Each structure stands twice: as C-alpha cells, then as structure tokens.
Amino acid sequence: MDNRGPRAGEPVVVAKGVTKTYGRTRALAGVDLEVRAGEVLGLVGHNGAGKSTLMRVLAGLEACDEGAVLVHGKEVSGAAGPRAEDFRAVRMAYQETSLCPDLTVAENIWVSSRHCLPRLGWRRAASDAVRRRLDEMFPGHGVTPRDRVEDLSLAQRQMVEITRASLVDRLDLLILDEPTESLGPDAARSLYDYVRTLTAAGTAVLLISHRIREVLSVADRVAVLRDGAVTAERFAEGLGEQDVLTLMGAHVAVPSEQDRAAARAAGDAADRPVVAELRGATGPGLREVSLRVGAGEVVGLAGLAGQGQQEVLERLWHPVRRDTTVVGTRAYVPGDRQRSGVLPLWSVAENLIVTAMRGLARQGLRRPAEERAAVGDWVERLAIRGGADAGITELSGGNQQKVIVARAFASTAELVLLDDPFRGVDVHTKTDLYALIRQEAAQGRSVVWYSSENAEMAHCDRVYVFRAGRVVAELVGEEISEERIIAVSFAESDGEQSNE
Amino acid sequence: MSELLASALPSRARMRRTAPAVVSAVALAVMITVCASLQSDVLSVGGLTLVLSATVPLVIAAQAQMALMSVGDIDLGIGNFVGLVTVVSATTLVTSPLLGALTLIGLVAAYAVLGALIHLRRVPSLIATLGASFVWLGLGLFILPTPGGSTPEWLASLGSWQPAGFPAPLLPILVVALVVYLLTSRSALGVRMRGLGSNPVALQRAGLRPLTSRVIAYTVAGALGVLSGLMLASQTGGGDVSSASSYTLMTVAAVILGGGSFFGGSAVPWGVAIGGVTLGLVSVVLSLLDVQSNMQSAVQGVIVLAVLAGRVVVGKVLR
C-alpha cells in the first residue's frame, strides 16, 4: 500500500462555515479550515472547543448542519449525510482507540482496511502490511499481527491504532487525535519522523494535541479552535508556547510563589507522620524501591511511562507485602477512565458519591440529603458541566475526569493515589484539579501522583523519578523541574549517581 | 531479559484464554477414567459410541449458543427450537419431504429475522429469545401435541450408523467444531461477528453495519439449531418439542466451560466442543455411579460449579 497523494499545496479537505448543534449545545459555530496537501496542520484548543466534533465532520463520520465540507474541491456534505466512498482517503487515528480488543491486530486491520485487502488470504496480506508499517513507524514496537489487542499495553495499542489509520491504498489526509498521549518519547519521535515522510509524499496530516510544544515542533501551521470556531491560524515558525496558550485563552498553570513556599516547607519537614512507606520493595517491575509519604504531602512518581510507577501505586493500594506499610484508608483514581473509571449507566451524582456513600450512611442506610449536599458541593467546586443529574457519559472527557477525581477526594480516604489521571484533559480542567490537589493536601491529605507529563510534577512536594523499576532520583522543592526530570529519567549514569 | 519477558507474555495470554477449555478437558478425562474403572467396556468403540452419542445434539446446540454469545447476545430459546426441529422432522419431513425441508429453512430464516428485530428495535436478546422460545414451544405443540411420530428413513439410518474403528459420534462433533472454527475464527464473517461483540463503535466507524453482523450470527445459530434438532431426532426416532428444553441453560454452561464469555467478542468452538461433551458425560457418570435419579440434577449442578470454580482459580493463577 503506497501513499500517492495529490500535488503539494492544493487543499485536500476544506471546511466552509461548518456548524453543528447537539440538542442545545452548539459544538461548531461556523468553522472555516483548509488542510493542504503535504503540510502538517496542528489543531489546538481546550476540551469543549469543538475539536472532536470538527474531526468527526472532517472524517465523514457525521454530517454538518450548515456549511460545506469539500474533499478535493468536491462538495461531499450532501443532505443524506456523508458517504463513505467520498471519505475513503481521509483516515483518523482516535485517541480512545477504535480497535476491537478481542480481535487480533491483523483482524482489526481487516475491519478498517478491508477494501484494500484481497478477499482470499486477507489475513496474511493484513499481517504483512501491518508488520511492515509498524516496523517503519515504530521500530522496536514488540507487536505481532497475531497478538490480541487486549493483551497489548496502552502504548502498543496506540501504535496499532495509528498504523491502522495509515494503512490504506490512497491516503490524502491523516488525522491524528492526541497520538502521543500514551506513547513514550522514542515512539513519538519515530511517529513524527514518519509523518514527515508522509507529507513529503503529498499527504496532509492534521495533528490534534494538548502538548503544544510538540505541535509547534512538528506542524507547519497551527489553527486555534475556540468556542466552536477557528479563531487564529498561524505559521508554526517563530511561534512560542506562550503565544499559543494566549491565543487559546488559557491561564497557564504555573504554581504560585505561595505554593512553592509550601512545597519547600514540605520538603524540609522530614518529621511529619509517615502515612505510607515502601522499604526496598522488589518484585515484578520493581527493584529495591524505597519511598516515604508524609501526611499532607503530595508525592510525585515521574519518569518515562512504564518504569515501575504504576507498580508502586498497586503496592500502596494493596499493601499486602511486608515491605509496604500504609496507615489509614486509601482512594484510587485510575488513568484508563473508559475501562476502570466511570460507571457508564449511572448519573454524575451516583458516580461521584459511590465511594463516600458508606462514610455518609448511618447504620447501613444511605442518607440522600447528605449525599446530595456533598455532590452539590463538589459539582460546584469543580464546576462540573451538566450538573449532578446528567448521565456520566453525556459529559465531555475532561468533566468525566473531574467526577472521578472528585469521587476519590469526596471519600474520607487519607491517602489518594492518582494513576496518571489527567491524560488528554484540557488546560482549564487541569488547573482546577491541580488547585484541588493542593487544597486537599493543605488539609492534611496525602497524595501519591503518577504522571507521564513531567510539567505536572511541579505541583508536588517531592518527586521520585523512576527508571527500569528503580528510583533513580528524589527531587525536593525547587529541584523539581521538567528539565531536571527529563535529564534524570534519560541519563542512566546520572540517575544512578543521584540514587547513591 | 526484557526481550525474554516480551516473548513470554503473549503465550501467557494465550494460556489464560485456553485455560477454561483445559480445565474442562481435565474434568472430561477424569470422568472417562471413572467410567472406565466402573465399566471397562466404555473404552471400546461401541462403549464410546454409546456414551458420546447423547452429547452430539447438545454440542451442536452449544455451538449455536456460542455464535450468539460471540456477538454479546444470549439465546434462551435454543432448547425449544431444537425440540421444534425434532417435531418437524418427525412429521412434515416424513409426509412431504419438500415442505419439511422448506419449513426447516424457514426456521433458519426466522432466526435471522429475530436477530434483525433485536437489533433494529433494540430489544435485549435475553427477552426476545425468551419470547421466541414460547413461540417455538407453541408451534411444536400445535404440530405434534404428544410426543411421537417417526423420523424419515435416511435420518434414522444416520443415527444408527456404526462404522468400524472409531466411535461415530466423534465425527459430527469434530466436523461441526471445525466448520464453526473456520467460520468464526478464520473468516471475515467471523471477524464481523466478534467485532460486534467486542467493540460495536469500531465496527461502525469502519463502515461495517452492526445489523449485518448480528443477522449473520443469528443465521448461523439457527442453522446449527436445525442441525442439532436433526441429530436429536435421528437418535430418538421421534419428535418431542420438550425433549431438549434442558439444552437452553446447558448450552450456556458449555460455552462458559469452554472459555466463552457473556460479554461477547470471543469464539471458542473447540472449547465449546469439550465443554459440551463434559456436560453431557456428567449424567452418564452419575448413572454408572448408581446415583439416585432424583439426585442427579443436583449432583450435576455441583459438578458444573466445581469445574467453573476450577476455571476461575486457574484464571487467577495465570493473571
């Protein structure tokens, strides 16, 4: 499957005054956007700005209410809705992957690319194609076409999803929705290398990401989506992260001087009562990890993805081994909200209160008035859109995440474990949640926070950096910075020195 | 080291998936051993034929159940459906073979329509198939109010076929499992079915209609149900609409024993064959052990629970 695109520079997909309304929410309010052959167009905007809706319209999954979508200059937004044939050369890699977990990798390729596979022997053809493309895009991926998707890691699933989207006989536009959220830095780099070869062959790439620096380093142009319309289009050359954030209308989440002071104090206060402790913990994925969590402390677990951070959370959640001591109750915020976070049939209120319910109940009987008060309090405090009675699945991803975080903090747990909960959450929500974490810590709660985003670690009192199941550095207070964390998580010799 | 780990991981996942069928197979081996120790003739060709023949319709019906469970549905009507097929084959198929054959094809089509209705009207399959089971029962009673009739010559001779050298019932069990395996695990149609059970959204995004997947699954289930009924009629030599009513839940148990899941997405034809034979053999073992017939159902249930518990334990160990 080769990718012969059109000549560079000519528009591949054009949106003209596209609007889309769901019920009372106006998701798109007249979007004008042009994606040209051979370019990488970065699309930024916080959750709720209409990115996903725009993507669905551009990928031909949904019709727009007004306006028009043109593919190669041909209007394809007929009244009967978009037709699959018109959008065959437009492919999209979803953030929450669109793979069937019970099927093998090759079978998933058949599902999405069957029209370019032979009727007989499709399995071998799909296997060969996906193996070749995976080798090309993500060297060292460790995936075989016979693997079932459910047995793959999150990062591998993301790789397969991107590969799936790129496998087609003719690719004019590739839409990448948060492609690097689950990928390590190596995989991200090789992905963007491949994106370059794609654009050199004339394919257009539309990149959506919350990682603005990444967008700026890869994209030729950047479009900013805000409240359902494109408010700015700039060339990426010479544009800074701050500029983009300003265009998005976001407040940049930088901890205030006060927070810093608090963090310094926490770092010094070695005499705080210890809430949780690991002493030389060794096991699958962990090698002699020692760490300590004091009362009212926010402890970060940093480093590249999959270096033992989640195993530490697991140990703290189930402290069954001798080398782990945890005092008091715990609450856990999972990272994979679709799989282990929300209770999809329940309302926001029920999802929020389920952990705290037992604490509020009297003699095993629930007390609806108290529950409602607590829910109302949290909904207001975190400004959860949709209110307490909305179904949880009606909320946007960011708001769902708020509910899950609130669930943990609404309980009486003394130790809150966060398993990278802010993946793909918009800047506003993140800022709210960071503030929440600091507030709760100030009231004496302890938080253990694993994050794949190093910038988030600035909100911690103490950060343990992991590499290959070991703690390679412990950073306190002002030592915590993105550059420092990256430095210790990459440089092996450095890391081992700081461990000693 | 990490490379070694990586190469070991998929095999572990595969072990976890095949574990239920392995547990059932162990239970099967134990039961055959018990049978053989009580009655050494069981291990002869004739003995195995006798012991296995009763399991053939059950195993085929269990494959039908698996087809539906692979899309995430469940069939509570399969027992009465098989019973209805025995009635048709003992009456209409004898008096006017053409009409009888058409009726059987019509029954398969009815299953397909049922699947389409379930999809389009968004009725839970549990309820729709339960309703359908009363329809099958009513139709069966209408055609043949009391058990009786006689099966056509060719069907009866099929039931009494005794080749030398191997137990005849193994042949339909293995052939049907192979066909279902090729269909559900190797073919594109199977990918559509399992894809629906696994992630309907992905299917839709790829431009595949979930309705088609569901109708395919129901058609397959209907065809296997008809085959199961024909095999049952060939063994009993007559028609009885309630002769297979215990199949409904036994087939579900067989699928679960074989490693299937209620949530859909997986197809385990070989596991289902093992699970079905295991379940069918339980009653044979119990009669050889002289367990009172009043107690048999209870003991059967306990044995099924024990095997399921074994499946859970093995699953935990392999996690």
Image: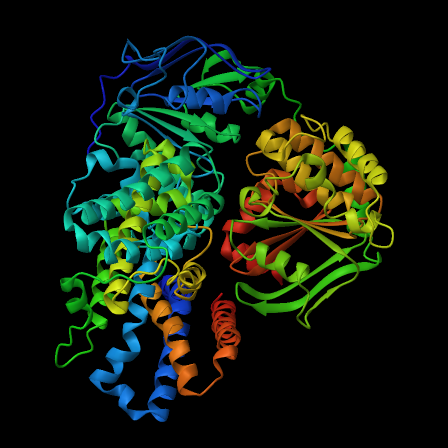
The residue lying at 43 percent from left, 14 percent from top is: A64
Residue A328, percent across and down? 79, 59
Q: Nearer the viewer, residue B193 or B33?
A: B33
Q: Residue furthest right?
A: A362
Would residue A222 appear left or right of B159 to someone viewing this image? right
Q: Nearer the viewer, residue B263 or B7?
A: B263
Extreme residue in the front direction: B146
Which residue is at the front of the view, A167 or A194? A167
Residue A108, horizontal then vertical, whole percent: 32, 44
Q: Residue at x 59, y 41 (%)?
A: A454
Q: Determine if residue B70 is in view.
A: no
Q: Position of residue B288 (x, y in %)?
A: 39, 86
Examine the rendered structure and indicate whether residue A329 appears above or below residue A29: below
Q: Find residue A171 and report its image quarter.
A: top left
Q: Coloured how?
A: rainbow
Q: Please say whether residue B95 is visible from this viewpoint.
A: yes
Residue at left 50%, top 52%? A491
